[in-house]
Image (tube, rainbow, N blue to C red):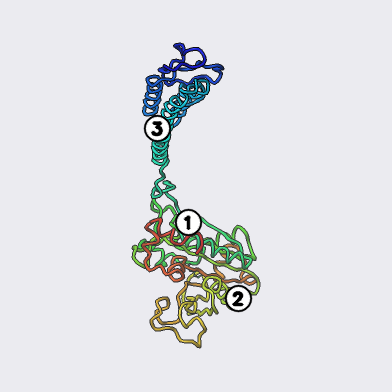
């Protein structure tokens, strides 16, 4: 038996003690017995604690307890120098090998536990990049709304004002003030939605022209207004018709306005909407509230015809069907009867009015082939146009 130079180990710091951390403050730890059973037991204890450690944090405590300064093996190692010369080599080998085995086991277990911990962390922190980032459905402005705003901007750019009126309208504004006869066909039940009960005197407005009469009464003359809004007619829904659609009305009342001003205004709206060298063509027509009245056509903006009337249209053009012209709506000089109905003296003031269909502009300008897409409310249709059209 090899004894340390100092006192033999008492119970508390016995080499068989369990792997509990020894306080650093243990100032003069007892010297353990340096013999094979003691060292082997210390090594076995250490190895058992190492393999029992379930994580790197626990393993750190095991390391401190078994190979730290206060551990049996370290204390034994320090005691070798005080042994008789002839015992040093054997003791050194015994302790060195034991400590070596423990260090090796610690390193292996450390690698094993660190790898397991990293794997667990990666699994816990996994991000599924295919999951949607925002589960709330997103809406989008309808392209008709956006286009309506754009058209309003064109009016504002010309120095005009925007005016709106009600969708449920008095028959008087929708028809009478606009010089419709009491037996005008547009008043028939098959064209107009009447509001119950019968004789209510109210309709779903069939056009935006009643806004003309309202605003003339409200604001007086001179007046330059654009009136965008929804209108209603008893049409069946098909690829080019819908019972609910949108118009924008233009009305200018001032002294000395003529049809030349009307054409110039239409030309600048056509240019703002479609670009190119606009040419407006008027064809004789009839509306009760304008005199003379006309249908207005814009030169096709899509095919060769856009370069002017001396250039031919493409016979296969899908926008103008090879005619070179696109029908845009009705217009004319405001009928003196309308001005009188709202208290304006037609001898002093004249003006012009026009009505454009917004759905039609969207179809032509943005290539929408079927009206159904505009009314079905599929958000993908709106999203396709983004925030600007
Ligand atoms: N209100 C007419 C329509 O809906 C269009 C129009 C407006 C015609 C202004 C002449 C003047 O068809």
- Image quarter of residue 104: top left
Earlier residue among tags 1 and 2: 1
In front here: 137 or 287? 137
Horizontal placement of 153 versus 122: left or right? right
Residue 111 percent coordinates (x, y):
41, 37
Q: Count the marks: how many?
A: 3
Specify few, some or many for label 1: CA neighbours under 10 Å numbering under 14, 14-19, or 20 or more: some
Q: Secondary structure at mark 3?
A: helix
Query: Which is closer to the viewer, label 3 or label 1?
Result: 3
Residue 200 percent coordinates (x, y):
43, 52
Residue 113 percent coordinates (x, y):
40, 35
In front here: 156 or 24? 24
Earlier residue among tags 3 and 1: 3
Q: Residue under circle 1? A: 141
Query: Which is closer to the viewer, label 1 or label 2?
Result: 1
Earlier residue among tags 2 and 3: 3
Q: Residue under circle 2? A: 261
Query: Which is closer to the viewer, label 2 or label 3?
Result: 3
Horizontal placement of 170 versus 369: left or right? right
Q: Residue under circle 3? A: 105
Q: Is mark 2 within 8 Å of ligand 1?
A: no
The reply to whether dot 3 and dot 1 touch (C-beta < 8 Å) is: no
Residue in view at x 45 percent, y 80 percent: 303
In front here: 89 or 367? 89
Q: Secondary structure at mark 2?
A: helix
Estimate the spatial distance between the alpha carbons at disc 1 and disc 2, rounded to whole Å: 34 Å
Residue 37 percent coordinates (x, y):
37, 20
Residue in view at x 37 percent, y 58 percent: 376
In front here: 62 or 190? 62
Specify few, some or many for label 2: CA neighbours under 10 Å numbering under 14, 14-19, or 20 or more: some
């Amino acid at each position: 038996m090899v004894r340390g130079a100092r006192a033999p180990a008492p119970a508390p710091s016995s080499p068989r003690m369990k792997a509990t951390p020894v306080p650093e403050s243990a100032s003069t730890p007892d010297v353990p017995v340096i013999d094979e059973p003691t060292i082997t037991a210390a090594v076995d204890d250490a190895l058992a604690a190492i393999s029992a450690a379930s994580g790197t944090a626990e393993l750190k405590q095991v390391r401190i307890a078994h190979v730290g300064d206060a551990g049996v093996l370290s204390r034994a190692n320090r005691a070798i120098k005080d042994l008789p010369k002839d015992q040093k080599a054997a003791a050194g080998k015994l302790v060195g090998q034991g400590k070596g085995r423990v260090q090796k086991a610690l390193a292996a277990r450390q690698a094993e536990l660190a790898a397991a911990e990293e794997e667990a962390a990666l699994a816990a922190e996994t991000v599924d990049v295919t999951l949607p980032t925002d589960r709330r459905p997103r809406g989008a402005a309808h392209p008709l709304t956006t286009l309506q705003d754009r058209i309003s901007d064109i009016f504002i750019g010309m120095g005009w004002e925007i005016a709106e009126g009600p969708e449920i309208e008095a028959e008087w504004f929708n028809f009478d003030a606009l010089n419709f006869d009491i037996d005008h066909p547009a008043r028939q039940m098959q064209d107009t939605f009447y509001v119950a009960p019968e004789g209510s005197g109210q309709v779903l407005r069939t056009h935006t022209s009643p806004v003309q009469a309202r605003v003339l009464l409200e604001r007086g003359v001179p007046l330059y207004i654009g009136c965008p809004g929804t209108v209603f007619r008893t049409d069946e829904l098909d690829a080019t018709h819908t019972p609910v659609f949108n118009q924008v009305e233009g009305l200018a009342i001032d002294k000395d306005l003529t049809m030349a001003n009307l054409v110039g205004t239409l030309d600048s709206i056509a240019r703002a909407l479609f670009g190119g060298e606009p040419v407006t063509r008027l064809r004789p027509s009839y509306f009760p509230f304008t005199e003379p009245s006309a249908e207005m056509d814009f030169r096709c903006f899509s095919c060769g015809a856009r370069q002017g009337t001396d250039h031919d249209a493409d016979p296969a053009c899908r926008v103008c069907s090879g005619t070179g012209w696109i029908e845009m709506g009705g217009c004319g000089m405001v009928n003196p009867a309308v001005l009188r109905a709202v208290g304006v003296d037609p001898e002093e003031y004249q003006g012009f009015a026009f009505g454009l269909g917004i759905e039609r502009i969207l179809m032509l300008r943005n290539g929408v082939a079927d009206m159904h897409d505009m009314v079905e409310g599929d958000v993908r249709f709106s999203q396709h146009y983004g925030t600007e059209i």
